[in-house]
Image (spheres, rainbow, N blue to C red):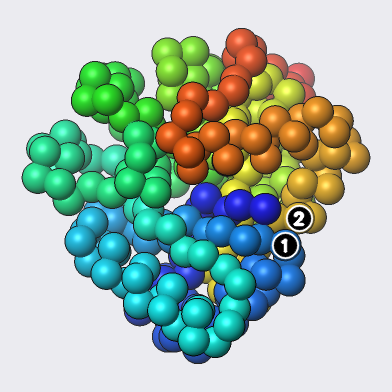
Amino acid sequence: MLDIHCHILHGVDDGAENEAASLEMAREAVREGITKIIATPHHKNGRYDNYKEDILLKVKKLNDSLQREEIPLTILPGQETRIYGEILEDIEKDEILPLNEGKYLFIELPASHVPRYTEKLLFDIHVKGFTPIIVHPERNAEIIENPNLLHNLVKKGTLTQVTAGSLTGHFGKKIQKFSKSLIEANLTHFIASDAHNTTTRSFRLQESLDVIEREFSHDLLYFFRENTELLLDGKAVYGDEPREVKRKRFLGIF
């Protein structure tokens, strides 16, 4: 099993605090059946900046520690970049790190809204040869209120990744229901842990996949697993035609 979103690198953001915490997360990941993790430290989110070369170095050091401790887990490089206007220039400067140094790029939106320049910037990222993936859209307040914003972006080629804990209810029932609505509407392409530690923000990846298989289908479970493998290989991922989400299905206001 693969996890494409995780804050396992220590001392770089609000994830693992030290090497011991990174190793504890690694052991828990192995217990869940995870064999590879893309480390995705925060970048340009107002609190943390983690540049490409620094991440590559820290990933190598953590893999060395995992080998020394005989933990059967491989860490791959990535970055969770908060959307900002100068991202194209920083791509040119080679400061932005796509997932596993491939063609897929994590983009984080602010928690409260979708910036007005989002659609144009994501289009420009496409033109640069990268495919943007919006992380945890199910936790964005404006998207929850107006899911058509996400539908429009996905229809134009942007991908999305829902957090495992959102599906299992660890962010509340409202977000859990909305996450399932995104799946039903073909508005997400990946499930990942976004794990920060082994207590309050753990992996819950296997638990979320169990929810998908139980409440949707085995085929959909395979869809999400296959997409993570395709992403790691730099190949085109699968996605059915996106549909609009009906607000009454998760807000209960009609």
In the figure, is residue 8 to the left or right of 248? left
Q: Which residue does the image show at 54% across and 87% down from the upper left? A: 69
Quarter of the image with the C terminus in it: top right
Q: Which amino acid does the dot numbered 2 rest on?
A: Gln
Q: Which of 252/108 is in front?
A: 108
Horizontal side, residue 187 vs residue 153: left or right:
right
Q: In the displayed structure, would residue 154 be above or below residue 77?
A: above
Residue 210 place in picture, x, y as percent: 83, 48
Instruction: Tell me how far mark 2 sits from mark 1, CA to CA.
Output: 8 Å
How many marks the image carries: the answer is: 2
- Disc sitting over residue 206 in the figure: 2
The picture places residue 158, in percent across and down from the top left corner, at 43, 24
Q: Give me the residue at 39% from left, 46% from top.
A: 99
Along the viewing direction, whichever of 57 and 127 lies nearer the viewer:
57
Crowding at dot 2, Cα within 10 Å, few <14 / some 14-19 / many 20+, comes out as some
- At horizontal 17% and vertical 50% (from top left) the residue drawn is 95
Can you say whether 92 is above or below 15 in the image?
A: above
